[in-house]
Image (tube, rainbow, N blue to C red):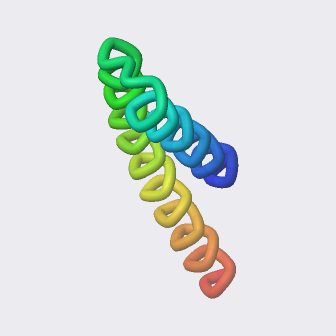
Amino acid sequence: MLHYSESNIEKLGEFWLFLSDQMKHKEFTTAIKEILTLQNKFHQSAETFVDDLEMDCNRIETEG
């Protein structure tokens, strides 16, 4: 899940750079920047969830 999130962030970053540097499309770069911000928030939440889940699994393994 985290891999796909990172891929989305990279692709959105590529689009943003292309549209802002090459095409000068402010309306698209603004929209992509908003989506990129939301994707980053999702990625951080997913990363926290995975870390918490791994800690719980490790705790269960050591207790069991």
Q: Say which quadrant the C terminus sits in.
A: bottom right
Where residue 57 appears, as percent x and y from the top left, is 63, 69
> Does 11 sit above or below residue 50?
above
Please give the name of the residue rendered at 54% of the width and 33% of the height, measured from the top-left corner: 15
Q: Relative to the observer, which residue lies in front, 18 or 56?
A: 18
- The residue under the point 68% across, 79% down is 61
Q: Position of residue 35 (x, y in %)?
A: 41, 26
Q: Is residue 47 left or right of residue 3?
A: left
- Left or right: where 48 falls relative to 55: left
Q: Residue at x 43, y 58 (%)?
A: 48
**Residue 64 vertical placement versus 41 (above, below):** below
Q: Residue furthest toward the top? A: 27
Badge count:
0
User: Is 34 placed left or right of 18 in the picture?
Assistant: left
Compared to residue 31, the image places residue 52 above or below, namely below
Closer to the camera in the image, 43 or 24: 24
The quadrant where residue 5 appears? top right
23 and 51: which is toward the camera: 23
Going 55% across and 42% down the picture, which residue do you hit? 14
Q: Position of residue 4 (x, y in %)?
A: 68, 45
Q: Decide if residue 1 is on the left or right side of residue 50.
A: right
